[in-house]
Amino acid sequence: MNLHEPWTGSTFNVAAFLITVSSIFYTVLRGRTVRKQNKLFLGILIVTMLSALSTVGSIFASEFSDYSFAARMVLYDMEYLYFAAHTLLGPLMFYYALMICDAAEDLGKRARRLLLLPGIAAEILALLNPLHKSVYFFDETSQFQRGPLEVFLYLMAAFYALSSAYILLRYWRTTSLDRKVAVLCFYGLTAFGMYVQMVTVEVRVELLAEALSLMGLMFSVENEDHRLDRMTGLYNREALYEDLERYVGRKRPFRILTLRLMDVLTLQRIMGYNAFDAVPVQCANFLKTIHPWIYIYRAAPGTFVLLVPAELENKTELKERIVTRFSHSFSFGSFDGLLRYYLLSARVPEEISTLSDLLMMADLPIPVSVPSHILEGENLAFLFRNSELEKAVRKAEEGKNISLCYEEIYSLEEKQAVSREARLVLEDETIGTIEQEELLVVARQCNRMEELGKFLIREAFRSFSKAKEGGEGPAHLHVNLFLALLSDSDHRSFLRGLLEQESLEAAEITLEIAESSVSEYPGDIGRAMRELSEMGFTLALDNYGSGYSNMQEMFALPFDEVKLSGDLLGGVGENEVSDAVLDSNIRMIREMGMGLLAEGVRTGEQARILKGLGVELIQGSFHDENGEVGLCMM
């Protein structure tokens, strides 16, 4: 008895079996078994594995079929298992193509059921083959023979392949490149294997081609490591943009929920680097329990976005569960208390229909005047005007509807204004006044940051020089240096030229660099800042407490001053947690030897608390009824 021949004849199928087993193990090990798409892909792997296993079994059994009745029974069973399993592959792959192209809902339930009928017919034909023997049969010598209806199975497979190709072409523009390539490679390799095996029945290469294609799908489609946030395991901002673009492009109805946590960055600083991930991880773990089929994204350190398909919206009490959880305390190390949050909710496309408005739910500053921490319907009006904002920014003309306003910076010790910050403001006939924070969010989308940044610096220097000549206003100027200018290699010559032109000294000016710019800067930000410091400018870290960089990275840079974000002042004087958070940050900054400026001060009580904590300068817009402190816009 020679076993060399069956081993040689089954080499391709043994390889296919090992590849699919390894793929199944890898898929389960990586935890990609939760979503419908994952489950379907795992089912396809199992079907291919069973097909390969049955083929290997039939090849070996055929060597003994002349001598053993048991071997003939094994041969018949293995061939039956092969046809029963492998016939499923066509319809399963078609439905998988629908899912990865996100086309299942567009097709509709009725159409999906009709398209399933050829697969059901083929599977029944394979299962009942022992009765009619029209797909295959064994002759008197136990040799495999093709039946007249075997060609129907091939036609059915071709039908599903062509249907998948149609789906891919129809959704070509809104399907990512890696998914398109993966599907094309699968059907290309599978078609090649089918052709070879149909022409030469002895060369069973079809399953190996399918196994290799599935492994490609596993790494290019099922593997979403590049779309995941490493800290929380949720999808990242890049994935959010990609999925929103696809959903909006296809006019897919869904609900978007955006959870904005206001204290995440502050708590991370208080707890230290070792507990840096405690807040987002605990929040992410809670959100994961809501429903396994809801896509959840971490769009920013304290911002989570949930995309809820229309068919799940009425089956899950999403808002209620989130509100209930956040009405109870969170425990992070030494912190035990409530987290301040906003929950924004809208239906797409009924309430919001553009990609830019959807992204604004995660990015746009929330006005202080909002009436509730749950924002939906009319309370989202500040988002809905985004398209008008974009139009206003795009058509804005320097010196006409874009100008500067100034906010005084007040010394708590001297009780007088010692500097003032130049800020952009846009006046539009349609939507009124747009202040700097809101203006910059839109300007980033319109790619006008460099243009606005140069206008701000140029006009601020000119106005400051003119005020000095007339002996008006404070003798110092604060102004933002945007990332678009900071990353420009010519920023030094631009600033030096303005100093000479306006007869100003760099020591009279503080350049404010936003905390988010530290992590977004494309090169060596320390070198760029040292160059500015050597020119004589004072450098301030702006918006401390609302950005994206970590303490070690920030405080290694040559900052002279830190501007505490207004986010850190929320609740100060009203609850012990907010007071402790603020005190911890101030003590840490003072230990670093940096000056302190608190922006967003709105009450005299806040000013007195800040003075008691050692803050030298404050900036805001309020009138103190006691007359001790009074700041206002100029």
Image (cartoon, helix red, strand yellow):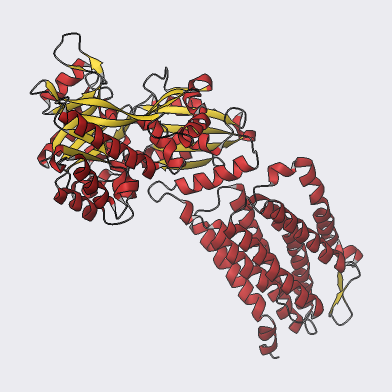
Occupied quadrant, residue 408:
top left
Residue 565: image location, x then y, percent: 26, 32
Residue at image position (35%, 27%) is 340
Compared to residue 609, the image places residue 475 above or below, namely: below
Left/right placement of residue 269 relative to residue 627 reads: right
Left/right placement of residue 487 relative to residue 392 reads: left
Residue 183: image location, x then y, percent: 65, 61
Occupied quadrant, residue 516:
top left
Residue at image position (36%, 21%) is 368
Residue 353: image location, x then y, percent: 59, 33
Left/right placement of residue 43 relative to residue 377 reads: right
Residue at image position (25%, 52%) is 493
Residue at image position (35%, 47%) is 484
> Is residue 286 visible to the viewer in this orientation of the structure?
no
Foreground: 501 or 526? 501
Occupied quadrant, residue 417:
top left
Residue 97: image location, x then y, percent: 68, 55
Quadrant where the N terminus sits is bottom right
Foreground: 621 or 240? 621
Foreground: 253 or 310? 253
Compared to residue 80, the image places residue 367 above or below, namely: above
Compared to residue 78, the image places residue 310 above or below, namely: above
